[in-house]
Image (spheres, coloured by chain):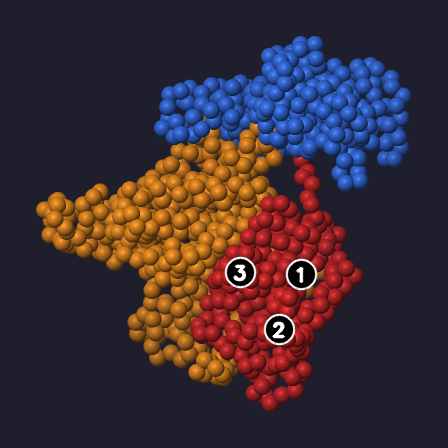
Amino acid sequence: MTDTTMEKRLPGEAVTSNAPSPLLVAIKETIFTAVLVFLLGILMVGFQTQAIQGQYLSFVTRFSDVIWAVAIVPIGRFLLALDRQGISWPALIVGGLAFLYFFGAGSTGVMELDVYKTLPLPFEEPMVNVIFGLGALLVCGTAIKSIRTAGEGRQTLPAREAAEARRANFAKRLSGVLGPALVAIAIVLPWTPWGDRQLVDSLILVLTYVMLGWGLNIVVGLAGLLDLGYVAFYAVGAYTYAKLSTELGLSFWESLPIAGALAAAFGVTLGFPVLRLRGDYLAIVTLGFGEMIRIVLINWQVFTGGPNGIGSIGKITFFGFPFERKVPEGVTAFHDLFGLQFSGAHRVYFLYYVILVLALITNFVTIRLRKLPIGRAWEALREDETACRALGINPTNTKLTAFALGAMFAGFAGSFFATRQGFVSPESFTFIESAVILAIVVLGGMGSQVGVALAAILLIGLPEALRELALYRMLAFGASMVLIMLWRPKGLLSYREPTILLHAKNKKAMVSGTVK
Amino acid sequence: MNAALQQMTDPATPLLTVEHLTMRFGGLVAIDDVSFAAAHRGITGVIGPNGAGKTTLFNCITGFYKPTVGRLTLAAADRPTMLLEQMEGFRIGQQARVARTFQNIRLFTGMSVLENLMVAQHNKLMRASGYTFLGLFGLPSFNRAEKAARDLAVHWLDRVGLTHLADEPAGSLPYGAQRRLEIARAMCTEPVLLCLDEPAAGLNPRESAELNTLLRSIRDEFGIGILLIEHDMSVVMGICDHIVVLDYGRKIADGTPAEIRADPAVIRAYLGEEEKE
Amino acid sequence: MEYLLQQLINGLTLGAIYGLIAIGYTMVYGIIGMINFAHGDIYMVGAFQAMIALMIVGALGISWVPLQLALMLIVALVLTAAYGWTVERIAYRPLRGSTRLAPLISAIGMSIVLQNYVQLLQGPRPKPVAPVIRGGFALTGNDTGFVVQLGYLQIIIILLTVALMAVFAYVIAKTSLGRAQRACEQDRKMASLLGVNVDLTISQTFIMGAALAAVAGMMVTLYYGVNDFFMGFVAGIKAFTAAVLGGIGSLPGAMLGGILIGLIEAIWSAYFSAEYKDVAAFGVLVLVLIFRPTGLLGRPEVEKV
C-alpha cells in the first residue's frame, strides 16, 4: 500500500514515513474540498446580480446550486483520493455511473436522449449537469489509468526517458501517416457529398488558423521566441489589403505580396529594438505592441475607419475573372469562362483552395527552411543563445529573420481574411486571437507541423461544430486548453526529426525541444 | 569590423596578446591588470585556485564581457590584426575566429550530434546558401557547400570517436562524449585560437589521456593556438607549452611547466588553498 | 497647476490599484517564473465578490459605512484567495517542472475559463454599483475657478495601499513564510532539500497575490462603480506592465511601476488624448526595457557562462 502511495505522489510533496491510513487522508481531503467549494461558490454562484434599468443592482439567490456543488464535488475528490491510495474501483464505478447519469440526463436539453428525459436533475441549467458529468468522466478516466498502470511501480528516470522516446516515435509515425492523409482529405473534401458550403466555410476558418499556426511556429516553435502579439501582423496584412483595395483598386493577387512585405517590415521594425530581450520580457513587449496596433486601429479614424473598420473590400477573383453574376462590359466572369451556371458557391470553394495552397506553401517553406543553415541556427538559438554567440552566429539578425518570416505569413493570412470577409475591423484582432494561435502551436506540439494542423482542427473546428453550446463554447474552449496542457504538456504530437542524418536507416524521432 | 582592422600581422608577434586586462563588477575586481601572451602553435595553460578569475578572463577574450581596462590583440597569420575588446560578442567567433568551450558544457542538447557540428559552420553555410534565398531552391553550389560542411563534421566526429552516435540527440550522450563533442564543435568553426574551459573536468583518467592526445594533435596539425583552463595537473603539466598562473585576479607566475612547478608563489597559492580544505 | 495637481491625485489613486495587482504578478513570477495570465481575472472575480458582498451587506441593513467596508474587504479577500489557490492547484501545479510554455497556455486557458464562468453566472452586462463614499476635501479654491478635489475614497485607497504594503514588506522580510518564499525564489530545489514545503509556499504566494488583487478589485468597485466580466484583461496587462516596469520580482518595484503607469495614464489622458493612454503606457514600458532591461528596481543580472 505504501508503495503505491509513493508512486502517485506529486513531485515536491514531502515524504512522510508513517503514512496515515488512506481513509483518513481521503476524508481530510474531502472536508477540505467541501469547504473550498463552499467558499468558491457562495457568492459567485449563490447570488446572481441583476442590473435594474442599468442603474440599481438587485439579486436572486441560487443556494440550491451551491449546496449541490458542495455535496457532489467532494465526493469526486474523495474517490480520487482513494484512487491515489491504490483503491481505484470506487472511482471507476461511481465515476462511470455519475457520468452516464449527469451527462445523459443533462444533455437531454441539448440532444434528444429519450431514455433520460424523466430523470430528476440537481441543477436547473442542463449544461451545468453536463459539466458535472464530464467531471465524473475525468474521475472515471483517472481510475482506469491507475488500474492499467498499477504494479508498474515508480517510474525511474531512464524508464521515463524511454517512455518519452516511445511517445516521440509514435508521434513521428502517426504524423507520417496523418500528414499526407490530412492533405489528401483537404483536397478532395469539397467534392464529396459532405463538402457542402457550410462545412467548406468552416474549413476556410480552420485553414486560416492552420496557416497562422504554421507561421507562428517559425517564431515560437523553431526560434523559441515567445510572441504574444502575433495578431498584429495579421491585422497589418488585413488592413493593407483593405486600403489597397478600397483606395487604389488593387486586386487581391496584386496586394498579396505587398501585404506580406509590409507585415514583414513591421516585424523587423518592432523586432529590432526588442529582440535582445529574454523570454518573458519579449512576450510582454510583443503583447504590448499587439495592443498598441489595435488601439491605433480603433482611434485613427481617418485612415482605418475606427471601430467600424473598412468595408466593401474587393472580393477575390479567379486570377482576374470575378465570381459575379453580372460583370461590367469587357470583363469575363468565372462561370462564363468555364461555361458554368453561376453559383455563389464557386467563390467559397475557390477561397477554400486558395487558403489551402497558401497554408501548404507556409508549410513547405518552413520544412525547407528547417534544413537550411538559417533554420538550424533558429533551433540552436532556441536551445542555447550563449553557445550560438560563441560560434559566431549573430543572434539579433537570426531572430529578426524568424520574426519577419512569421510576420510575412501572418500578413498573407490577413489579406486572405480581408478578401474573404469583405470588411475588416479592430474587433478581429484582439489579444485572444494571438492567444488562440499560440495555443494552437503549443497544443500541437512545438515545431510539429502536423500537430499544429491537428490542434487547429480541434480548437477551431470543434467549437465551430458545437455551435449549440452557445454561451458555453468559450468556457469549453478555455477548459480544453487547460486540460490538453495537463494531459500532454509537450503538445499532442511532439517530436523532432534531425535536419540531417549521417546513418540513413537510423531514423529515430527525437524528443522535441522546448523554449527555455 | 573597422575598429578591429589594423595592419597585417607581423609573424613575430604572438597570436594573442593580453595587456593590462582589468575587469570589475561593481566593487569586485575579478581580474586585476593581467598581461600575458599566447603563442601561435602553442598550448597555453591558465591555472589558479577557484575564484582566481580564469573563466572571467575567458569571457573577456571571447567577448561575453567587455573588459573595464585593457587591450586584447589577436594576430593570426595571414589575417588582419584584431582588437578583441572592441568587437561585439558574436563577431569574435565570426571574424576573429576565436572558438571556445564552456565549463558547464553548452551543447544544443535537443539537436543531433551532427546538427551541432553543422550549426558551428553557420556563417560559411549562410554565405553559400545566398543568405537563404538561393538555398531555398536547392542550388547545386549550396548543396556542394552543405556536403563539404558535412564532410568536415564527419572528419571531426571520427577524430573524437562519435561517428556512430551522429544522429543521436547531443543531450543523450555520456558526459565525456559531450565534452569531446563540444571541442569538435568548436573546431568545426575552423578557429585560429581555441579556448577550452576545463575540458578535462569530470573525465576519467583514460578519457583525460585521450584528451591530451587530441589537443596535441590539434596543435600540431592545424597550427592553431590553444588557451586552456584546467584544474587537472596531469593535463596541464603534460601538454602545456606555457602556463599562466592567476590568483585573486592577479597574475602570479608565467612560464614553462618546469618553471611553474618550482615557483614559490604558485606553491603558496595552491598550498594555501589546500589548507583551507 | 491646479489641473496638474488634480491629475496627480487621480493618477496616484489609479496607480495604487495597479500596484496592488502588480504585486501578485511579481510575486508569482519571482517564485515560479511564470506569467500568471489568469491574475487579471482573479482581480475581476475579486471585484465581483466585493460587489456582491456590498450588496448583501446593504440588504442585511448594515448601513454604517466603516462596517460595510470592513465586511466587504474581509469577504472579498477570503473568497478571492480561495480562487487564487484553486487556479494554482488545478492549472499550474501539475505542470511544475514541465516546459515553460505549458503553464503559460494553461494560464491563458484559465483566464478564458474564469471570464466565461463569471459571464455565465452573473451575465454579460456591466454591473452598476451605487457609490458608498462620497465627497472629499477641496484643496484649492482660488480665482481660476478650478477646484482640486481629494476624495475621501481616494484617501482611503491610498492609505489602505500603504498599510498593505507595510504588512507585506514585514511578511516578506521577517516571517518564516517570507523567508521560505525568498528561498524558493532563489533555488527551489535547494529550498525543498532544506525542508521548505515548496508546494505550500507557492500556494501561499498565490493566496497572497489573489488577496491583494481582491483588495484592488474592491477599490475599483467603489471608485468607478461599474464591473464587467472583461475588466480583468486590460487591468491585468497594465498591472503586468507595471510589474515589468518596476523590475519583475521586486515588491517595491511593482508598486512603483503601478504608480508610474497610473500617473502616465492620468496625465496623458488629461493633456494629450484619452484614446491613446494605453499606447503611452506600453510605449514607456518598451523604452524602459530597451534601455534598462531589468526594469527600474530589478537587480541587473550578470550573465553566467
- Which quadrant of the structure image shows residue A302? bottom left
Q: Label 1 sits on what residue type? A: Met
Give yes or no for contact between labels 3 and 2 (Cβ–Cβ under 8 Å).
no
Q: Which mark is residue C255?
A: 1
Colour applied to chain B: blue
Q: Are marks 1 and 2 on the same chain?
A: yes
Q: The chain drawn orange is chain what?
A: A
Residue under label 3: C272
Q: CA distance from mark 1 to mark 3?
A: 25 Å
Disc 1 from disc 2: Cα separation: 34 Å
Q: Amino acid at mark 2?
A: Thr
Give the image quarter of residue A196: bottom left
| Residue type at the position of mark 3 | Phe
Q: Quadrant of the C terminus of chain A?
A: top right
State the residue position of label 2. C144
Task: For chain C, give the colour.
Answer: red
Upstream in sequence: badge 1 or badge 3: 1
At label 1, counting other C-alpha atoms closer than 10 Å, the crowd grade (few under 14, some 14-19, many 20 or more) is many
For numbered disc 3, what is the local secondary structure? loop
Residue A480, x across and y down, in percent: 45, 59
Tell me which numbered mark, 1 or 2, is placed earlier along the sequence. 2
Tell me what residue is drawn at x 72 percent, y 69 percent. C163
Q: Nearer the viewer, residue B117 or A140?
A: B117
Label 2 marks which chain's residue? C
Q: Which callout, 1 or 2, points to the residue nearer the camera?
A: 2
Q: Residue at x 54, y 68 (%)?
A: C44
* Viewport quadrant of the N terminus of chain A: bottom right
Q: Secondary structure at mark 1?
A: helix
Badge 2 marks a residue whose secondary structure is loop
